[in-house]
Image: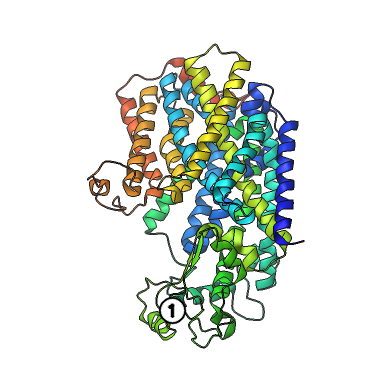
Amino acid sequence: MDLQTTIYLVVGLSFSLYIGIAFWARAGSTSEFYVAGGGVGPRINGMATAADWMSAASFISMAGLISNMGYGGGLFLMGWTGGYVLLALLLAPYLRKFGKFTVPQFIGDRYYSKSASTVAVICLLTASLTYVIGQMTGVGVAFSRFLGVSSETGIYVGMGIVFLYAVLGGMKGITYTQVVQYVVLIFAYTVPAIFISMHLTGNPIPQLGLGSDLVGTDVSLLQKLDSIVVDLGFGQYTTTTAGSTLNMFVYTFSLMIGTAGLPHVIMRFFTVPTVAAARSSAGWALVFIAILYTTAPAVAAMAKYNLISTVNTAVATNGDLYAPEASLEAAKQPDWMNRWEKTGLLKFEDKNGDGRIQYYNDKTKNQAVLDKAAAAGWKGNELSVNADIIVLANPEIALLPNWVIALVAAGGLAAALSTAAGLLLAISSAISHDLVKGVFNPNISEKGELMAGKIAMSLSIIVAGYLGLNPPGFAAGTVALAFGIAASSLFPAIMMGIFSKKMNKEGAIAGMLAGLLITLFYVFAHKGLFFIKGTDYLDLIGGPNSFFGITPEAFGGVGAMINFMVAFVVDKFTKEPPEHIQHLVESVRTPRGSKAVDGAHA
């Protein structure tokens, strides 16, 4: 069976399964639509949470980012997994004990204010819509390469699939669909990694293969990779950092608290029956996520090694990356590159007409590298590779069987669609439950609210599709920006709502608005989204990364600190919360069955 037929078969079967589950698990009440009836077991919820969490960013982009950045890309692993520890310890059990459907509902009730709930909805929509752009873009990338259609057509198909299982099933349908999607994506991620690790190092466990010697040598994979990239004029793979140490710290911090503040992830902990189950499901989610996250560094390093070895034939001949005598026949463009060029995510331009692909850092100041390149007839870097193709193209680069390539196609689509569904449910719940029922029509019937939820979901899918088809100028960094927005706006309000019984509505509202607006301004000043002629907003903030060298993707951590400071300052000058709210906060934090300690002997 040829490759294209195999891909159609595997992807078609996975889609049929998702839609079948949606019909089986249709939501018949608002409780089933928002929180799957609140009866999902911790293991099932942990698996669904892992699929909800491991988006196109985790499956498609993360290993690509680590592959490009080297050691510095580790901040994504530390930030995103660290965020789940925060969720498990500081948020999930208390939010489940509070017993609400959505994050804005928690904030509205905790801060005894519809205004606070409305501001939370604005923050939620801003973060979720920013995040969903990346998911729809991932759907387009996967479809365009593997199903032989344009990315636009791919997005339309993806919209249709999500509509069928998200609108019909709500959280109930999404939960069980995400369990299947987790199985698909984790096999799609680990199976190629096992093949490639075995081929390169002889070790079938990728996590161990990363530190093992290459087959037939006494040189480790990482040592060889360091040597190659330095020869190409790049920094050492194992030591290169993402900007300054401060920026790496703030970036990691932003991803951590952004993870803990993302509404579509938090909503998953409202679906379990008890507080203990919420904590347990967070633990299970970490286990399921760790399978992919501990594999990602190996996938990144092996993909980079395979990519350079494939496109630079001198590596495969005599080890000299710039050897002019390398044969043109051996150096011709591989078939996998021809296929990926059609997507626009990989570009090769033979600038010197020698038939070889010359790929290295043309910004290097290493004169020895430049001299070698000149001797090989270099006329400029000839290859451009988008980080998003590293995982998807890896099996093709390594010449793995067709069924493995098809499995990766299904996994990439499962990752993007599962997170898109979770985000869209968070968006529709905020609109139908927190705005329609909570603000505009408190007396709406359950049937009317369920219909409002489905209409909001349908409209959200249309908006998400439009953003995927017409992404704004900052689309490349949308995932990190979404975490920054959640970190700077929602996380502090949730934390203070649980752990500060004196925090009042004025402080929470002021903090959320301050954190959100300062983060958006810093981001948009860098990304050029202010459409006022003659105004350069970078000048207003002192130039690129002017705040202590912090990049816009990392600025959410700064926004969160501003949120906390503004909230506590405003709180000091305004009236404290009512007594019943303070008692509510205490009861949420107090374990059931505990008694006050008075020092007396029993």
Q: Picture coordinates of residue 498 (x, y %)? A: 49, 29
Which element is circle 1 on?
A: loop
Is residue 463 at least partly visible in the picture? yes
Q: Residue at coordinates 26% horizontally, 52% vertically from top-left?
A: 543
Is residue 273 at least partly visible in the picture? no
Q: Residue at coordinates 40% horizontally, 44% vertically from top-left?
A: 557
**Please, which residue is most extreme toward the top here?**
443
Q: Residue at coordinates 71% horizontally, 40% vertically from top-left?
A: 18
Q: Picture coordinates of residue 117 (x, y %)? A: 45, 24
On the image, numbered disc 1 is attached to which residue? 352
Amino acid type at image mark 1: Asn
* Nearer the observer, 462 or 581: 462
Q: Residue at coordinates 46% horizontally, 38% vertically from top-left?
A: 127
In the picture, the quarter occupied by the C terminus is top right
Left or right relative to 273: residue 311: left
Q: Picture coordinates of residue 348 (x, y %)? A: 49, 69
* Nearer the observer, 16 or 478: 16
Left or right relative to 61: residue 602: right
